[in-house]
């Protein structure tokens, strides 16, 4: 059976993985790869089976229909093909660029919404081992997974958990397990997998509301979810409305630096960007300066506060109030910590700010770099990550003196849940 690979709207990660692990497919009896442009095989040859990666934009519809007509079998490969994901990211902020829409780039759909699909391989990136099994089954005439998407087998109702802060939509989840691992790494275990076989999905234990399940609202699971099945609350609209009314912005210095790095500009230019968006004044704060000179066990956000109370109840009485940015009602907060959304509304993350900048059409390179100055911080001990925080809390409980700041995110705030996603994956 001749197999041809096609790529549409995606990052192409699944196909590069496929090319790197091609030897797994060469071991499958009865198949021959006749088309894969990444290998230099790009002629419009005859084939029996098409493996389609990526989501289908309106300009791809005719081509994918032609592929369907030529193929006995079509396999949708990876999350973009199953769920339309990467190409639809622009919709996350509810913003559209009209000329893209006109050119047909934006209305991305999963493959099965455009043509009939015979089988699916889920994942981001998708598993080449699983693809090898599917191709083997199709080539041998045994087709176990026909016409159905990952979650449409014997699935009962899709599960949605939403407490206004965090939302989990099991209909989108590809069960990659990143969120479950991260939450367990924090020693929180608020997320788990439920059901068996094709019905497996991610939820909280006994499907309890997040807080009852022990969630500390760190936001890390949402930051690392590759398909936005987990999302944290978005205050973007309210922040932009406030900017239009001439409100103020109070930003962590680290959030400015992170947004600047993601955008390839100077942090001072991000201050100018905030003013272009309408903020009348931009106050830059290093939150560590807010605890300089204070004595005690200081949680950096509500997430650390909950974490200590749940894990070390004996040390809870030693806790001082968590660090809060000095933001009045007429201000929007900009942060690298999703937990700060609990303190103030609107609060936007450095990730959200970088996304706003990309969609704003403001030419960042032309903006002046405003000078930044925050006082130096001295004498503050910071415990970073769950392991270090656990040990530091135990030792502080034995000898409570000095200032100890807790940051439970692995890698601390520099890898906080509000960091631009691209930087998180690099660090
Ligand atoms: S927000 Fe943090 S604590 Fe809550 S479920 Fe996600 S990773 Fe776990
Ligand atoms: S990170 Fe997202 S896609 Fe992966 S298991 Fe969790 S909810 Fe599902």
Image: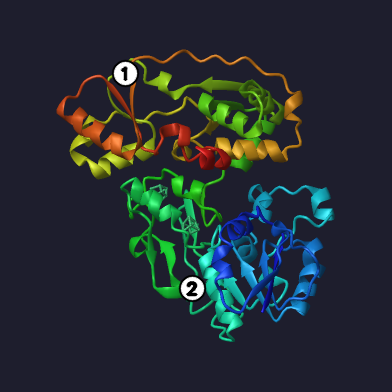
Question: Which quadrant of the figure has residue 147?
Answer: bottom right
Q: Looking at the image, is 155 positioned above or below residue 123? A: below
Q: Residue sitting at 63 percent across and 69 percent down?
A: 76
- Residue holding disc 1: 294
Judge whether residue 122 can be spotted in this image.
no
Q: Residue at x 52, y 74 (%)?
A: 133
| The N terminus: image quadrant | bottom right
With respect to residue 278, does 148 lie above or below? below
Residue 245 is situated, as x and y percent measured from the top left of the image, at 67, 31
Instruction: Say whether disc 2 or disc 1 marks the residue closer to the N-terminus.
Output: 2
Residue 10 appears anywhere in the view:
yes
Q: Residue furthest bottom?
A: 141
Looking at the picture, how far across and down is residue 244, in whole percent?
69, 33
Q: Residues within 10 Å of mark 1 (few under 14, many from 20)?
A: some
Q: Quadrant of residue 310?
A: top left
- 396 vs 181, left or right, is left
Q: Nearer the viewer, residue 220 or 239?
A: 220
Residue 408 drawn at (x, y percent): 36, 37
Q: Secondary structure at mark 2?
A: loop
Q: In the image, 408: left or right of 284? A: left
Numbered mark located on residue 157 in the image:
2
Q: Which mark is residue 276?
A: none
Some atom of ligand 2 lies within 8 Å of the CB belonging to the residue at label 2: no
Distance from the alpha carbon under mark 2 to that under mark 1: 51 Å
Seen at 57% across and 27% down, the residue is 256
Residue 407 is left or right of residue 18, and the answer is: left
Query: Percent from the top left, x then y, of residue 114?
Result: 73, 71
Q: Secondary structure at mark 1?
A: loop
Pointer 1 residue Cβ closer than 8 Å to ligand 1: no
């Amino acid at each position: 059976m001749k197999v041809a690979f096609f790529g549409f709207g995606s990052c192409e990660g699944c196909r590069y993985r496929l090319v790197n692990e091609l030897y797994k497919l060469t071991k499958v009896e009865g198949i021959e790869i006749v088309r894969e442009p990444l290998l230099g095989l790009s002629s419009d040859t005859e084939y029996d089976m098409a493996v389609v990666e990526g989501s289908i934009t309106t300009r791809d519809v005719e081509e994918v229909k032609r592929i369907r007509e030529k193929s006995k079998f079509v396999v949708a490969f990876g999350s973009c093909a199953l769920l339309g994901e990467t190409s639809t990211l622009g919709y996350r902020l509810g913003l559209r660029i009209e000329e893209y829409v006109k050119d047909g780039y934006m209305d991305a759909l999963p493959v099965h919404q455009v043509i009939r699909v015979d089988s699916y391989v889920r994942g981001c990136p998708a598993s080449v081992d699983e693809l090898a099994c599917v191709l083997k089954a199709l080539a041998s005439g045994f087709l176990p997974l026909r016409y159905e998407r990952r979650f449409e087998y014997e699935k009962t109702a899709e599960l949605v958990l939403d407490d206004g802060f965090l939302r989990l939509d099991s209909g989108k989840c590809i069960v990659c397990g990143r969120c479950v691992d991260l939450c367990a790494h924090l020693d929180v275990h608020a997320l788990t997998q439920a059901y068996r076989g094709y019905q497996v999905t991610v939820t909280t234990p006994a499907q309890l509301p997040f807080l009852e399940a022990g969630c500390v609202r760190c936001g890390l699971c949402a930051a690392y979810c590759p398909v936005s099945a987990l999302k944290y609350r978005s205050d973007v609209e309210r922040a932009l409305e406030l900017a239009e009314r001439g409100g103020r912005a109070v930003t962590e210095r680290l959030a400015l630096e992170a947004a600047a790095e993601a955008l390839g500009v100077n942090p001072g230019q991000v201050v100018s960007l905030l003013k272009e968006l309408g903020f009348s004044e931009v106050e830059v704060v290093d939150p560590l300066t807010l605890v300089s000179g204070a004595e005690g066990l200081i949680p950096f956000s509500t997430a650390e506060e909950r974490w200590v109370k749940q894990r070390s109840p004996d040390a809870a009485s030693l806790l001082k109030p968590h660090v809060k940015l000095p933001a009045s009602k007429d201000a929007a907060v900009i942060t690298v910590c999703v937990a700060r959304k609990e303190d103030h509304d609107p609060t936007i993350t450095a990730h959200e700010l970088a996304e706003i900048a990309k969609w704003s059409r403001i030419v960042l390179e032309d903006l002046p770099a405003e000078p930044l100055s925050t006082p130096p911080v001295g004498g503050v001990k910071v415990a970073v990550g769950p392991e270090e925080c656990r040990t530091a809390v135990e030792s502080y409980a034995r000898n409570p003196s000095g200032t100890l700041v807790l940051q439970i995110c692995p890698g601390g705030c520099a890898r906080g849940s509000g960091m631009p996603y691209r930087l998180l994956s690099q660090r």
